[in-house]
Image: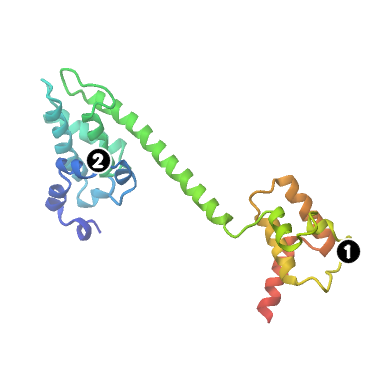
């Protein structure tokens, strides 16, 4: 899968080299939610490939910081190993965004040397930001779904204005309780009321339950049962 999308190992390393940060890190949403592989995913190129990819990224950070004691040798490799083992679920785009933010001084400064422990502390802060971004995205998606579900729904007041403009009482309260559906009342109208009782997002739970009881008292069944029977009758027809 990775080879089909990104080519062989050498091509992957060339494409996602440290300079690629300039292309994607100006838009955090691209890095967080874009279609990029995780550190765990790129193990498909080889067990140690995530370390192989991450070491040049860390080396680039070390050179950028201009510290006297740079991150190199065994320490560089060990730092890459710890990151890939502890944060294997991060996308490579998220790792690049993290390094970009370190360069921007977002988490503090590296004085004198590029300290691996400092980098891990910075990464811990980045992961908090990532969780917050994903949580915000999820809340926005839920709100979008709620908005979509409200389309086509009307409130009781709107229902009264449309169907009974001269009578402001709730339609279920206008008719004496009976176990039989009035023959003059179309089933489609009752169906509309039943669905509205179950889906109206603006009615509080207490009001909704009250109207459901009125519906059951009038029509001899719950709104859900009426809908099910209506759909069964339609299927038979």
Looking at the picture, tell me which residue is in the foreground, 175 or 145.
175
- Please tell me in which quadrant of the rendered image residue 90 appears: top left
Direction front: furthest residue: 166
Looking at the picture, tell me which residue is in the foreground, 175 or 142.
175
The mark that comes first in sequence, 2 or 1, is: 2
User: Percent position (x, y) of residue 210?
Assistant: 78, 50
Looking at the picture, tell me which residue is in the foreground, 143 or 65.
143
Whether residue 1 sits left or right of residue 204 in the image: it is left
Quarter of the image that includes the N terminus: bottom left
User: Percent position (x, y) of residue 44?
Assistant: 23, 52
Q: Secondary structure at mark 2?
A: loop
Q: Residue at x 21, y 30 (%)?
A: 103
Which mark identifies residue 178? 1
Q: Secondary structure at mark 1?
A: loop
**Distance in Å between CA atoms under marks 2 and 1:** 67 Å
Direction top: furthest residue: 112
Q: Residues within 10 Å of mark 1 (few under 14, many from 20)?
A: few
Model colouring:
rainbow
Q: Residue at x 16, y 28 (%)?
A: 75
């Amino acid at each position: 899968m990775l080879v089909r999308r990104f080519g062989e190992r050498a091509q992957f390393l060339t494409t996602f080299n440290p300079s690629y940060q300039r292309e994607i890190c100006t838009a955090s949403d691209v890095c967080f939610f874009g279609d990029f592989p995780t550190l765990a995913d790129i193990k498909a190129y080889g067990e140690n490939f995530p370390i192989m990819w991450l070491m040049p990224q860390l080396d680039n950070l070390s050179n950028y910081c201009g510290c006297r004691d740079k991150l190199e040798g065994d320490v560089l490799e060990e730092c890459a190993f710890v990151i890939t083992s502890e944060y294997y679920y991060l996308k490579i785009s998220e790792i690049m965004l993290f390094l970009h933010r370190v360069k921007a001084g977002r988490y503090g400064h590296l004085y004198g040397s590029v300290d691996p422990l400092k980098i891990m502390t910075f990464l811990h802060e980045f992961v908090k930001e990532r969780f917050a971004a994903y949580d915000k995205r999820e809340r926005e998606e839920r709100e979008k779904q709620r908005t979509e579900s409200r389309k086509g729904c009307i409130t009781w007041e709107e229902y009264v204005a449309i169907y009974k403009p001269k009578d402001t009482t709730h339609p279920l309260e206008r008719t004496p309780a009976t176990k039989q559906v009035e023959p003059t009342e179309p089933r489609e109208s009752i169906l509309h009321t039943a669905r509205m009782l179950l889906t109206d997002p603006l009615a509080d739970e207490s009001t909704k339950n009250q109207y459901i009881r009125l519906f059951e008292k009038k029509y001899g069944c719950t709104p859900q049962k009426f809908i099910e029977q209506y759909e069964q009758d339609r299927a038979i027809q």
